[in-house]
Image: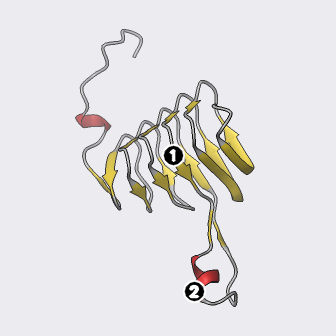
Amino acid sequence: MYDNVLVLSDVVVGRNTWIGPGCLLDGSGGGLEIGDWCSISAGVQIYTHNTVNRSISLGAKPVDYAPTKIGHGVYIGPNAVIQMGVTVGDRAVIGANSLVNRDIPPGAKAFGSPARLFGTEASRPKSARPDE
């Protein structure tokens, strides 16, 4: 993890996970969990809260909170934003500059704003590594 990553509150990061420069990891809304062997690229923002309802209600409504989970072996491209309450399944790939506002199933490839699904792990070529 680079020294300019902002980590807020309850964030748990698994083994062998790389977190690039300029990331924001927000665990203030019930916790953020990131699995093993993930690559979180530069500028990624992962949230567990938002202030939309509080702002548009002029403070009459509270801040919304929900835990967020990133599975094992997930790749998140540069400058992607993962919104509160989202679960990204194991071995999913999130494209650069994507806005992830709903759950992404294991092995899926998703990109865009908002992120849409484009294939699954079953459609990927097999690894060249003999141990997989």
Q: What is the tally of numbered marks visible in this picture?
A: 2
Query: With 109 as the anchor, is 31 left or right in this view?
Result: right
Q: Which residue is disc 1 drawn over?
A: 44
Q: Is residue 86 left or right of residue 119?
A: right
Q: Residue 66: x and y, percent?
A: 63, 64
User: Considering the numbered disc 2 on the image, is that residue within a helix, a strand or a loop?
Assistant: helix
Q: Position of residue 103 (x, y in %)?
A: 45, 57
Residue ID at (57%, 36%):
21
The amino acid type, in three-letter code, at marker 1 is Val
Sequence order check: which comes first, mark 1 or mark 2?
1
Identified by mark 2, the residue type is Ile
Structural crowding at the residue carrying mark 2, measured as other residues with C-alpha within 10 Å and reported as few (<14), some (14–19) or many (≥20) = few
Spot occupied by residue 24 in the image (x, y as percentages of width and height): 61, 48
Q: Place residue 84 in its image quadrant.
A: bottom right
Label 1: few (<14), some or many (≥20) within 10 Å?
Answer: many
Q: How far apart are marks 1 and 2 (CA)?
A: 26 Å
Q: In this view, does 47 lie above or below 6?
A: below
Label 2, on which residue? 56
Q: In which quarter of the image is the N terminus?
A: top right
Horizontal side of residue 65 vs 108, given as left or right: right
Q: In this view, does 132 lie to the left or right of 120?
A: right
Compared with 132, 117 (above or below) is below
SS label for mark 1: loop
Where is residue 12, by image quadrant?
A: top right
